[in-house]
Image (cartoon, helix red, strand yellow):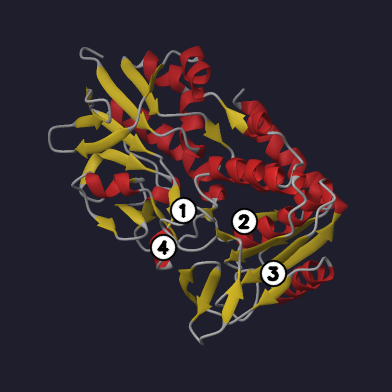
Amino acid sequence: MSQQHTVILVGAGHAHLYVAAHAETLVERGARVVLVDPTEFWYSGMATGMLGGMYEPVADQIDPRPLIEAHGGEFIQGRVESVDSRARQLHLADGGVLAFDYESINVGSQVDVNAIPGAANDPSVWSVKPVAKLWKLREHLEAKFRERETLRIVVVGGGPTGSEVTANLIALAARHDSDLRLSLVTNGDRLIPEAPAGAARALQRKLTRRGVVIRTQTQVVRREGELLIAEDGSLIEADIVVLAIGLEAHPLVHKTGLPTRPKDGLRINAMLHSIADERVFAAGDCASMEGFNLPKLGVFGVRQAAYIHANLLASLESKPLAEYEPQKRYLAILNLGDGTALSTWGPFWWNGRSSMWLKHWIDHRFLEDYR
């Protein structure tokens, strides 16, 4: 290649760990490969287990610097504030500017804390993302447990993350032999609505047996003092609120000048690049693929990883790009904090210790691949 091209990977997400681990193939084509991220990678698959005390935080993290440097790339510790796609420049929080020929964005999602008025500036309200917040929440709760406080905690959101968080809050309290008044609130008519109905019923029975008060068809509309106020006017007491609702794409994608969807992220096509710029790719929760409404789950970013790598390589070589087709079924395993897990795959589901063993094996294999 007569002219060196710069490939910048923005964010050390699931997909970019794979690209970083295969960066030498891009370097061999004459590219300079740079990964930009402000901190370590926290693996969402083990995050709730870390909250529940099953794992220490170091077990849930990967330092992306040695990974990409071992494969011929560079690492810049910094936060990208905006992208000038027309000028092909990234603007960093510290004032630095990086020029690129190709860019890939993999910065994930965040919780829309503004979805509940009064929540955004309340220190007693915690969100499940970014994952590092769950470690801070665990530290906060452990300090309270040591003081023998009986806490009223409400988890808002009955999807997979809210259900896992609830189960692992029970586990954390049990580890400290502490009392906990725990409620799970969802606006749906059941938990984990995308899962088989039998799995949802089994999950609800298990959480109820472990002391959780589950409130379905309850829309929280405001946080006021130590109360959550529901749409029907009912009041829910809460010393601590954990938000597991309203995931939205990282705001960086809206600072690219490229087409986006307000909550879903950068609009990409089957080749995983912007519908308006074939040199800007995106994967995972920050991307919105045309023709699909994909849930914000790590399994999609993991599957997209090889396509991002292959298409960056094809772009450098001026070859046709590969088309990614989202998987119709995917394995989801919820860590229930008691040594068991709930697995679902399409219409099939099973619950027990074998599910937890399988989750443990998958999670640790993923992390070890990048250490």
The alpha-carbon separation of the residues under discs 4 and 2 comes to 15 Å
The alpha-carbon separation of the residues under discs 4 and 3 comes to 20 Å
Amino acid type of the residue that numbered disc 2 sits on in the rendered structure: Tyr
Residue 307 place in picture, x, y as percent: 44, 39
Residue shown at 63% from the left, 79% from the top: 216
Amino acid type of the residue that numbered disc 3 sits on in the rendered structure: Pro
Report crowding for label 1: few under 14, some 14 to 19, many 20 or more residues within 10 A (C-alpha). Answer: few
Residue 296 place in picture, x, y as percent: 49, 55
The alpha-carbon separation of the residues under discs 3 and 1 comes to 21 Å
For marks 4 and 3 on the same chain, the one whose residue lies earlier in the sequence: 4
Q: Secondary structure at mark 3?
A: loop
Question: Is residue 73 in sight in this rendering?
Answer: yes
Residue 349 place in picture, x, y as percent: 76, 64
Residue shown at 48% from the left, 68% from the top: 223
For marks 4 and 1 on the same chain, the one whose residue lies earlier in the sequence: 4
Q: Of the numbered discs in the image, which one, if any, rests on residue 292?
A: 4
Residue that numbered label 3 is attached to:
347
Residue that numbered label 1 is attached to:
325
For marks 1 and 2 on the same chain, the one whose residue lies earlier in the sequence: 1
The alpha-carbon separation of the residues under discs 3 and 2 comes to 11 Å
Kindly give the residue lying farthest to the bottom in the view shown.
Answer: 232
Q: From what the image shows, is residue 200 above or below residue 350?
A: below
Report crowding for label 4: few under 14, some 14 to 19, many 20 or more residues within 10 A (C-alpha). Answer: few
For marks 4 and 2 on the same chain, the one whose residue lies earlier in the sequence: 4
Report crowding for label 2: few under 14, some 14 to 19, many 20 or more residues within 10 A (C-alpha). Answer: few
Amino acid type of the residue that numbered disc 1 sits on in the rendered structure: Glu
Q: Can you say which quadrant of the picture contains the C terminus? A: top right
Q: Of the numbered discs in the image, which one, if any, rests on residue 330?
A: 2
The alpha-carbon separation of the residues under discs 1 and 2 comes to 13 Å
Question: Is residue 46 in sight in this rendering?
Answer: no
Q: Nearer the viewer, residue 178 or 256?
A: 178
* Circle 4 or circle 1, nearest the eye: 4
